[in-house]
């Protein structure tokens, strides 16, 4: 099946009892059993729910994997992956990534004895150097949030295999439409489904997709034992979002390209971070592993005084000042004080995330209107 057909039909079978074409929202906590242990495959909704099951089938299909697992948020999905580990195990992670992932690693799991080493994963040599006999997991995010750095997934997968470590890729920024890490050798793909998969800024959800049955069983065990499962209404919303993912991503890519070039040519803008520029340091890898460059980008102003940055952030009308990304509507964000505030300032600055960086999630509105909005705000 081709992509568009998969996105529309994956996981969707008309409801056998009514013929409803859309998967029903099975708002139930439990299921009647005919006799103890005799049931229709559903016992208790933390363990199984038909709406979630349909979504998990769809997630596996769109990520070109065998198994999908849905969680109550992106960080809950990340949390489940780290719970595969034991005290003393080591994880290599990017020095530039979503602030909430950094917070989970440093503030929650480090105290349980999991050791995290942060490197610039855009350079494969840095990952290789950081490997030790205790490395159990390599975690990458590509493109990174918010600096749009790219890591070579296939090369990292080769290193991970050699080291006997798992590779998990946070594929939130690319979405399955632009990049499928499992086909490049990754063991697990993670998404904040809150973003492009949901696509309409109306749900918090996360997911994992994998090929290996025993890895799926371990992660399913964690999912049901720790209980961070999404409700059926949220599963329905993400299922619906997936049906238009390909159409939305095409427009996100078109608009993203136009806005990245507009910003780069703007006399008041000093730097634009977007992985579709041919002079981006990892453009060749991005082009090889991604089908397009998406709608995420960051930029800096020539006048990077806090007052000017604040003025621009508060002056757009179509770009709403808000956390999150990947919805149909455009958002503008100040990572240093919003999405990445949990990373200590010195760490942020060391890794290139300045106080003046502005991040955009370019939506699917008319690109001319979005450019006018930014132009007026930047001045
Ligand atoms: C790249 C990335 N990964 C993970 C997350 C966490 O997802 P959630 O907010 O759904 O828990 C986010 C949230 O912004 C993100 O941008």
Image (tube, rainbow, N blue to C red):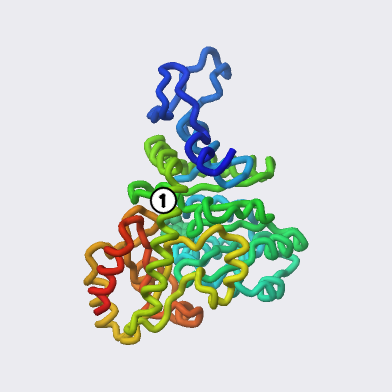
- Quadrant of ligand 1: it is bottom left
Nearest the eye: 311 or 103:
311
The residue at the point 39 percent across, 30 percent down is 25
Residue 338 seen in the current view: yes
Quadrant, the C terminus:
bottom left
Residue 346 lies, with reference to residue 99, above or below; the image says below
Percent of width and height locating residue 327: 36, 54
The residue at the point 49 percent across, 37 percent down is 55
Percent of width and height locating residue 197: 45, 48
Q: Furthest residue to the top?
A: 34
In the displayed structure image, the side of residue 18 where residue 225 appears, left or right: right
Nearest the eye: 50 or 1:
1
In the displayed structure image, the side of residue 146 where residue 212 appears, left or right: right
Quadrant, the N terminus:
top right
Q: Residues within 10 Å of mark 1 (few under 14, many from 20)?
A: many
Residue 26 seen in the current view: no
The residue at the point 44 percent across, 60 percent down is 253
Query: Helix or strand or loop: what does disc 1 sit on?
Result: helix
Nearest the eye: 72 or 298:
298
Which picture quadrant has residue 211?
top right
Residue 85 lies, with reference to residue 227, above or below; the image says below
Residue beneath disc 1: 248
């Amino acid at each position: 099946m081709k992509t568009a057909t998969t996105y529309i039909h994956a996981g969707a079978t008309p409801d056998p009892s009514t013929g409803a074409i859309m998967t029903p929202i099975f708002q139930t906590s439990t299921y009647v059993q005919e006799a103890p242990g005799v049931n229709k495959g559903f016992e208790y909704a933390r363990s199984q729910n038909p709406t979630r099951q349909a979504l998990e089938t769809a997630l596996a299909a769109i990520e070109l994997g065998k198994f999908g697992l849905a969680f109550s948020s992106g960080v809950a999905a990340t949390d489940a992956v780290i719970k595969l580990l034991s005290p003393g195990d080591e994880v290599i992670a990017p020095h530039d990534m979503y602030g909430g992932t950094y917070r989970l690693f440093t503030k929650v799991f480090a105290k349980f004895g999991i050791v995290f080493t942060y490197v610039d994963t855009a350079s494969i040599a840095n990952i290789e150097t950081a490997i030790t006999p205790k490395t159990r997991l390599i975690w990458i995010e590509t493109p990174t949030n918010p600096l749009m750095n790219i890591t070579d997934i296939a090369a990292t997968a080769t290193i991970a295999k050699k080291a006997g470590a798992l590779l998990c890729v946070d594929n939130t920024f690319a979405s399955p439409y632009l990049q499928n890490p499992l086909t490049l050798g990754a063991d697990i793909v993670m998404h904040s489904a809150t973003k492009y998969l949901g696509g309409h800024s109306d749900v918090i959800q996360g997911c994992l997709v994998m090929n290996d049955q025993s890895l799926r069983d371990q992660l399913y065990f964690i999912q049901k034992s720790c209980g961070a499962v999404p409700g059926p209404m949220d599963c329905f919303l993400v299922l619906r979002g997936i049906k238009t993912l390909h159409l939305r991503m095409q427009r996100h890519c078109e608009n993203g390209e136009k806005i990245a070039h507009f910003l780069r040519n703007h006399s008041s803008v000093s730097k634009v971070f977007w992985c579709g520029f041919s002079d981006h340091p990892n453009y060749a890898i991005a082009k090889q592993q991604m089908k397009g460059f998406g709608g995420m980008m960051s930029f800096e102003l020539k006048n990077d005084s806090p007052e000017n940055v604040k003025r621009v952030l508060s002056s757009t009308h179509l770009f709403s000042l808000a956390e999150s990304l990947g919805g149909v509507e455009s958002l503008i964000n100040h990572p240093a004080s919003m999405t990445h505030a949990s990373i200590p300032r010195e760490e942020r600055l060391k890794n290139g995330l300045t106080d003046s960086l502005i991040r955009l999630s370019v939506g699917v509105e008319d690109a001319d209107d979005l450019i006018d909005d930014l132009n007026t705000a930047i001045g």
